Amino acid sequence: MESYKLDSKIVEEDKEYLIQTINDLNEGVIRTSFFLNGELLDSKIVPHGGDIAEADLLNLIKITHSDKKLELEYLLKSFKDVISDGKAEVMFHLGSALFYRRMFSHARQLFQAAIKIKHDYHEGYFLLAQTELASGRIDAAVKAAIKAVELQSQYADYRNLLGEAYLAAGSCKRAVIEFEEAIKQNIYYADAYFNLAIAYILNAINREDFEMYPDLAGRTSDVLKKAILINPNYKTSIYDEAVACLSSGDLKRACMLLKTVREEKKEIARQARTSHSDRFLLLADGISQKSVAERIDNLEKEINRNPGYVDLYNELAYCYLFQSRLGWQKGVEFFKKALEINPQMPESRRSLELAEEYFLKLNDTICDITDKHF
């Protein structure tokens, strides 16, 4: 079987985006990678059976590549439209999609615009703080996280994020206060326990607060055990190495390894949530029925080849919902056209009223279903 590669470039002002799709022969997948000015932002795979015909494989590569190019073009166009429209909630949702794609510059502008319009938009400050932290803009991250906590002090996630921002700024004592507060809000908050362990170790390295020195190993081990008990996914081979370094007194390496574990977990979560931008696209008016139908066809073929791949079933369910939305929307449009030709058709007017009423309910239901996953 041959190896194929497709490249597409989109240039916008000082930014050059590259979408690259290849057939990875070693792993038996199609891999689409997304670059900004040469830096890899994201990568997504589509599995395929080894017995796939050459023509089907090439067609799947082309469609996968085209979908990602269409998505990027739509997201960039939406960015301009949403900024112009001035609707804070829409800015927030598009900003979230861009954030999970690691398009931090665009996401930052949307979150900043949203909180400028809606000053008490705590979700906007929270995502802005995450964006600034991921971009390495630590002071800005601290400032945004403080504002989110001021607006909703009882949110454990906000406290934990502020703690991470303080930790990145080198303020272990203030970080510990926030992590402990997050745990008070939610005693089953594994991330806060894990961050607390990192803060204890970093404090010992930086020699900031002597009150946290006594029984460092015991104190750190206790919160790490709680984090692992609540979320076993933290316990990786790197985690085991970090614990060994902690026991031997190599604090710097232990801290570095625990941060690696934390960032790897964040990356897994980020990749799982990049589908937000896919669904933002599918909910948009610009998506075509043909594109959704092709996506459904490809997903069904892949399920036949990979019947145990649960994510494929999940995405197929979403696509069928979006397809029904598009079909219903088309029905509404044709009732309107019928009335344009003959405004005196009572059955068409009644049908249009009912169709429009239920389309709003259908659209709200789809939005509610997808929102539950973000």
Image (tube, rainbow, N blue to C red):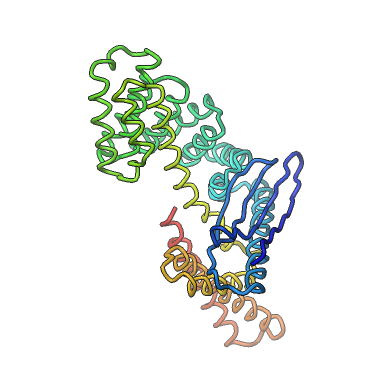
Q: In screen coordinates, is 173 left or right of 57?
A: left
Residue 369, position as x, y percentages in the image: 43, 62
Pick the residue in front: 294 or 59: 59
Q: On screen, 205 above or below 29?
A: above
Pick the residue in front: 372 or 237: 237
Q: In screen coordinates, is 197 left or right of 126?
A: left
Q: Can you tell which quarter of the image residue 213 is in? A: top left
Residue at left offset 35%, top offset 33%: 241
Q: In screen coordinates, is 89 left or right of 3?
A: left
Residue 347, position as x, y percentages in the image: 57, 88
Pick the residue in front: 155 or 39: 39
Residue at left offset 28%, top offset 33%: 224
Residue at left offset 35%, top offset 36%: 239
The quadrant in which the N terminus is found is bottom right
Q: In screen coordinates, is 368 left or right of 93?
A: left
The answer to whether residue 69 is seen in the rendering is yes
The answer to whether residue 89 is seen in the rendering is no
Residue 112, position as x, y percentages in the image: 58, 37
Residue 354, position as x, y percentages in the image: 51, 78
Q: Number of numbered discs present?
A: 0
Residue at left offset 67%, top offset 68%: 58
